[in-house]
Image: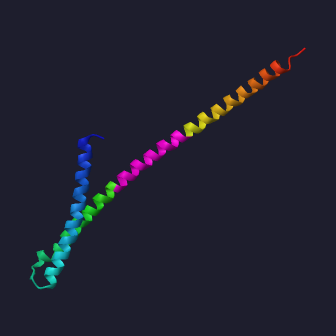
Amino acid sequence: MDKTEKKGKETLEGLAIFLMWFGLIGIFLWAIAKSLGWIHSPEWVDMVPYLFGSMGGAGFFVYCGKVLNRLERVEKDIEQVDDKIDEIVQDTSVIKVEIKAQGIKIESLERNVFNPSK
């Protein structure tokens, strides 16, 4: 992963976190101002919580998308590790067979050396 790709991912994650907090703070401030009577609102101002809520929701979903992307990458890494483990198991089986064959050869040599045929 090069630096520009990494910076782009960090920027997207920062944007998602900003949108979540901006939405939550916006709704909170609007609710306080409305309850204190500071907002005597026309209809469009009553839509403010929906605006901030949708911003927070957008941030949440962008962040969830990043998490799912990471999970997919982890899943691929696990599959690669699983493939490597299978390869190691096969190599180990081959080594066991070769060791057994060498053991048979050594036994044969020992019999010939220590018990020569007459």
Residue 85 lies, with reference to residue 102, above or below; the image says below
Which residue range is magenta in the image? 67-85
Magenta stretch: residue 72 in it?
Answer: yes
Instruction: Please tell me whether residue 31 is drawn above or below residue 104 in the rendered image.
Output: below
Seen in the image, is 43 located left or right of residue 2? left
Q: Quadrant of residue 48?
A: bottom left
User: As rendered, which of 52 and 110 lies closer to the eye?
Assistant: 110
**Residue 28 in picture, x, y percent from top left:** 20, 75
Q: Percent position (x, y) of residue 105?
A: 74, 23
How far from the left and from the top, in percent, is residue 33? 13, 80
The residue sitting at 66% across, 33% down in the picture is 96
Q: Residue at x 22, y 57 (%)?
A: 15
Q: Quadrant of the C terminus?
A: top right
Q: Main secondary structure of the magenta part?
A: helix
Which part of the image, by quadrant, shows the N terminus? Answer: top left
Q: Nearer the viewer, residue 98 or 16?
A: 98
Q: Which one is nearer the viewer's eye here, 15 or 52?
A: 15
- For the image, the number of numbered tags is 0
Q: Residue at x 21, y 61 (%)?
A: 18
Instruction: Name which quarter of the figure residue 24 lies in.
Output: bottom left
User: Measured from the top left, where is residue 94 in percent x and y?
Assistant: 63, 32
Residue at 9%, 79% (x, y): give it: 42
User: Which residue reaches farthest top?
Assistant: 118
Question: In the displayed structure, does residue 76 sit left or right of residue 89?
Answer: left
Q: Nearer the viewer, residue 99 or 20?
A: 99
| Colouring scheme, one of rainbow, by chain, secondary structure, one colour | rainbow
Left or right: 79, with 20 as reference point: right
